[in-house]
């Protein structure tokens, strides 16, 4: 059964947190730009969510990385985001047991190949359980030497 934390009328919380077994997600988050379901995203200092990019230091967060549960129509739209947990997507084609990373390029879906170019960031976000099931558990990013 989910555990919800709801604010009161005089002191609302910015989000409802849902915890189910190994899944943690945030509901009613606000998109800062367009992105697709299952894109790796991060929460910026402005509290909006943006697409990650292993080649761009400004798009590699130290915290707040997630996977979009929805397809927000654009900036300002509400959506839900996975923070941790077992996430299934039949369009993935992972190798069981393989590490999974933030992709190289803005708005890419998770990938099995770690970026290796000079100055790029490697951001391990989980492990493939099956070809379509990801144990989403982001770690700290590591920058490849320039």
Image (spheres, rainbow, N blue to C red):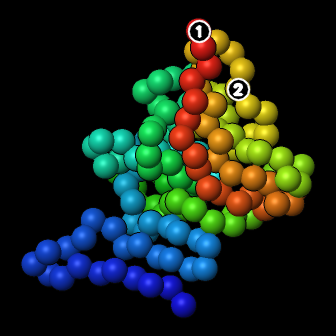
Q: Residues within 10 Å of mark 1 (few under 14, many from 20)?
A: few
Callout 1 secondary element: loop
User: Percent position (x, y) of residue 48?
Assistant: 35, 47
Residue 11 visible here? yes
Q: Residue at x 43, y 27 (%)?
A: 58
**Quarter occupied by residue 115:** top right
Q: Which residue is mark 1?
A: 146
Q: Nearer the viewer, residue 88 or 71?
A: 88
Which quadrant is the N terminus positioned in? bottom right
**Quarter occupied by residue 96:** bottom right
Q: Residue at x 53, y 59 (%)?
A: 83
Residue 3 relative to residue 98: left or right? left
Nearer the N terminus, badge 2 or badge 1? 2
Residue 11 relative to residue 66: left or right? left
User: Percent position (x, y) of residue 54?
Assistant: 59, 28
Residue 71 visible here? no
Q: Which residue is mark 2?
A: 115
């Amino acid at each position: 059964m989910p555990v919800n934390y709801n604010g009161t009328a005089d002191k609302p919380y910015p989000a409802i947190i849902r915890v189910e077994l190994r899944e943690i997600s945030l509901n009613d988050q606000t998109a800062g730009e367009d992105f697709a379901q299952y894109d790796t995203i991060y929460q910026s200092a402005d509290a909006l969510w943006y697409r990650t990019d292993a080649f761009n230091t400004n798009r590699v967060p130290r915290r707040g990385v997630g996977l979009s549960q929805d397809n927000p129509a654009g900036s300002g739209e509400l959506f839900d985001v996975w923070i941790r947990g077992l996430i299934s997507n039949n369009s993935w084609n992972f190798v069981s047991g393989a590490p999974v990373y933030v992709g190289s390029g803005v708005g890419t879906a998770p990938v099995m190949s770690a970026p290796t170019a000079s100055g790029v960031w490697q951001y391990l976000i989980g492990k493939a359980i099956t070809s379509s099931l990801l144990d989403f558990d982001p770690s700290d990013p590591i920058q490849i030497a320039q």
